[in-house]
Amino acid sequence: MSTEVNKRDVFAASVLDLIVRGGIQAVSIRTVAADSGWSVGALQKTFSTKEALLRAAVDLVVSRAEARMEAIPFDGDAVDYLVHMIEETLPLDPMRREEAIAWNAFAAEAVHTPWIAEILISQDQRTSEQLVEALRTFGTSQPKAAAAGIIAVSDGFALRLLYDPKQAEEFCTALRPIINHLLTI
């Protein structure tokens, strides 16, 4: 069973690699097999369609980000905690950059592909609900509004850092006062 899990991860990582290099249109059964070093037959035993491959790649991006966020300790400072959470979504290193490129490619494709839109909407709702709950525990008076603002800042900074990574330090410095302000609304 562990071999199957490993193959799934290898194939999903290859999908992300292909998306980074050429967009979603670069993903096919053949290109993923070639990129991963496995045969087309071995790939098709695990993933029979391009849709299944793309779903696995979305799951990989989400699980990576969730694992990083779960590892952030809460030391009692809500602003600091939220800043670190946002930083985990920003393309500040090669892996997070790969994830941000893939996520934005999925978002662009979701305009024309309802099943991708459904996955992203579901993930967005889950993220928002978790953030609202955290903000309630922090005593934020309007947790839904603050959550929407935090998500907008995270998404906006991530997108801009994809095409202008030189702004990383400036954006990271700006996070604390922005989050502090959002917690007061």
Image: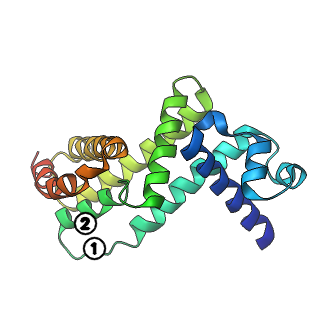
Q: Judge left or right: residue 139 versus residue 163.
A: left
Please state which of residues 22 and 107 is positioned toward the viewer in this rendering: 22
| Res. 23 visible in picture | yes
Q: At 48% across and 60% down in the image, what residue appears? A: 95
Task: Identify the image quadrant of residue 50.
Answer: top right
The CA distance from mark 2 to mark 1 is 6 Å
Q: Residues within 10 Å of mark 1 (few under 14, many from 20)?
A: few
Q: Amino acid at mark 1?
A: Phe
- Check disc 2 and report its element: helix, strand or loop: helix
Task: Please provide percent x and percent y for residue 1.
Answer: 81, 70
Please state which of residues 84 and 184 is positioned toward the viewer in this rendering: 84
117 is higher (above) or lower (below) than 164: above
- Give whichever of discs 2 and 1 has the lower sequence position: 1
55 is higher (above) or lower (below) than 133: above
Q: Which mark is residue 81?
A: 2
Q: At 57% across and 37% down in the image, what residue appears? A: 23
Q: At 73% across and 67% down in the image, what residue appears? A: 6
Task: Please provide percent x and percent y for residue 170.
Answer: 17, 53
Task: Please provide percent x and percent y for residue 123.
Answer: 48, 45
93 is higher (above) or lower (below) than 184: below
Q: Residues within 10 Å of mark 2 (few under 14, many from 20)?
A: some
Task: Please provide percent x and percent y for residue 91.
Answer: 38, 54
Q: Which residue is mark 1?
A: 74
